[in-house]
Amino acid sequence: MDQTRRNVLKAGGSAGLLALLATAGMLRSEAALAADWNQNAFGAKNLKDAFDALGAANRTQSADIAMVAPEIAENGAVVPIGAVSKIPGTESIAILIAKNPTALAASFDIPAGTDPSVSTRVKLAQTSDVHILVKANGKFYETKKEVKVTIGGCGG
Amino acid sequence: MADPMRIRAMAKDGEVVVKVLMAHEMETGQRKDSAGKPIPAHFIQHVSATWQGKVVLSANWGTAIAKNPFLEFSFKGAKKGDKIQITWTDNKGDKRTDEATIN
């Protein structure tokens, strides 16, 4: 990920800077969106590589992250997953599935004013641990839960 | 062009709860067709929600998000009658923006 650009965007919220970036075509352009998409993290074939690509090699287990996930998912193609972080200063929430072909499923940026709580539906190739990774104040926190799948989600 | 999203945004107790259903195949690239050829990946990579020009949620997705993706989140500050826009972009550059009124 283009860490410098991120920091610049975060640090300098001034309209002037934003206007400058927009003029330079760096803001919200297709290229910017594509650059934001972390190819290394989303392409990672296993959990460790995905965590490393997200810069989250060091993580703290936290009881302040609540995961809403079924014990048993009958259909791995549609598994509802919700994540709520009670950690102050939550900046982002990511969902990772240990045994999927690519581990990282989604990463949500949480701006100030938005609740650190998201829900979506994911695919599970097989019974697997589902991890929620929370970034808060530059540190990473994690919780996990096993979801059993009776029919896989990847078909074929 | 993809089908419109279904967006419901409801103001409740000082917060706005937003639920979105997008119409998208979310093809993983892992599957094969009946002839045994791999079906190329086709999935939403980026989703963002804006309210009054401010981004209230930004998400990057991989192929593990289920077909016809569902997303729920909530944020503070908006009121009934305000508009919210949701935009997604997929890995083939397709893009769709829909707007809903908060009620």
Image (tube, coloured by chain):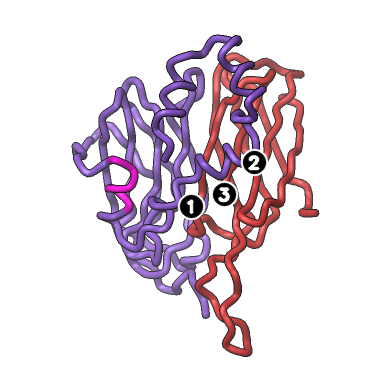
For the magenta stretch, what is the residue range? Answer: A50-55
Chain in red colour = B
Q: How many numbered marks does the figure carry?
A: 3
Residue under the image location 59 percent in, 22 percent down: A21
Where disc 2 sits, the SS reads helix
Q: Distance between the residues labelled 1 and 2?
A: 30 Å
What x and y, as percent, mark residue B51?
A: 66, 22
Which numbered tag is attached to residue B45? 3
Out of A128 and A74, give the one closest to the viewer. Answer: A128
Chain in purple colour = A
Eyeballing the image, is B9 above or below A18? below
Give the amino acid at mark 2: Glu
What x and y, as percent, mark residue A56?
A: 27, 41
Q: Residue furthest bottom?
A: B35
Eyeballing the image, is A92 above or below B76? below
Residue under the image location 31 percent in, 35 percent down: A65
